[in-house]
Image: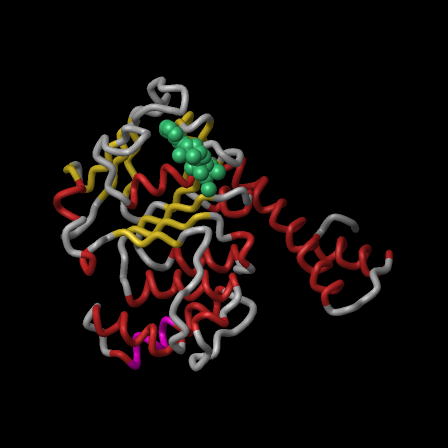
Amino acid sequence: MTIADLTVTGGRGKDGRAEPVSEITLRMGDIVSIVGPTGCGKTTLINDIELFANRNTPSGRRVLINGESAEESCSSDPARNPIALISQHTNFLSDLPVEDFLSIHATVRAHEGGEAIRETLGFANKLTGEPIIRTSAMTELSGGQTRALLIADAVVIGNSPIVLLDEIENAGIHRTRALELLKEYRKIFVFVTHDPRIALLSDYRVVMRNGAMQEVILTGKEEGRVAAELRKMDDLILDFRNRIRLGERLTENVLEEQMKACGYLT
Ligand SMILES: Nc1ncnc2c1ncn2[C@@H]1O[C@H](COP(=O)(O)OP(=O)(O)O)[C@@H](O)[C@H]1O
Ligand SMILES: [Mg+2]
């Protein structure tokens, strides 16, 4: 099945009232963020999508793929499930080596094992700062490595047309690089995020409050310009974070140099 779009029809917020956004359609190639304070229902929304909700979850939402009920068409055969969810809390129970884990998935998905595994690991290692060794046990991976591996696995081996990611920012993933790399694949990516960098690199964002979709904000030209400035500030902070990690002392000289390099001082 070729997926052109995914529609969520609104249900009820926590107070039982109809959601202000009554319908939203995500088209193939869209990068979407879901934003809002903790407890506002972000995870619930992506879980509804992953479950192909059909007015059978507490929100009463409905998920349509290509305009039709997704429940029957997609949920029967796990190998054909078009949706991959990378959740907030992933711990592996399996202590298989990384390459065996990927190899099993590649076999299920009928890929040429060796190449798919190389590509997946290569992709994962572009996302995380701590390279993943193929012989490591899955249980030994850090949070960032785990998330990077799962994203790469969903994109490359799973070839999932729809990828949902719940708050990857705390996991030591190169956020900007990840978005740039992901944009090369034509998929629907949905990020639950608190990170302005991810939200502003998205095509639009869904604002959640009190369990309900409140508003959809398109990232316009002005926000794009603001985002470019924020990116400089964030790079500055990341640079200083790294210096501290490496045991350096910070000096006003270095601060001045770095601010000049970013264009904040002349
Ligand atoms: N539309 C809704 N109707 C009823 N309960 C909801 C709804 N949306 C969220 N909740 C409940 O609110 C709580 C917090 O939601 P959650 O999705 O975990 O928030 P977030 O991921 O934004 O922190 C959960 O217990 C969830 O079941
Ligand atoms: Mg959540």
Q: Residue at x 48, y 46 (%)?
A: 201
Q: How many marks?
A: 0
Q: Residue at x 82, y 61 (%)?
A: 254
38 or 254: which is nearer to us?
38
112 or 170: which is nearer to us?
170
| Residue at far front of view | 93
Write down the quadrant of residue 245 in the picture.
bottom right
Q: Report the colour scheme.
A: secondary structure
Judge whether residue 206 can be spotted in this image: no
**Picture layout, residue 246 above or below residue 28:** below
Give the percent coordinates (x, y) of residue 177: 50, 60
Left/right placement of residue 196 relative to residue 138 reads right
Q: Residue at x 26, y 29 (%)?
A: 9
Judge whether residue 32 can be spotted in this image: yes
**Picture layout, residue 170 above or below residue 223:** below
Q: What stretch is highlighted in magenta?
A: 114-120
**Picture layout, residue 37 above or below residue 102:** above
Give the percent coordinates (x, y) of residue 154: 33, 61
Which is the main secondary structure of the residues drawn in magenta?
Answer: helix
Q: Which residue is drawn at 13% across and 46% down?
A: 73
Give the percent coordinates (x, y) of residue 261: 72, 58
Residue 118 magenta: yes
220 or 65: which is nearer to us?
65
Residue 107 magenta: no
**Picture layout, residue 164 above or below residue 104:** above
Write down the quadrant of residue 213 in the picture.
top left
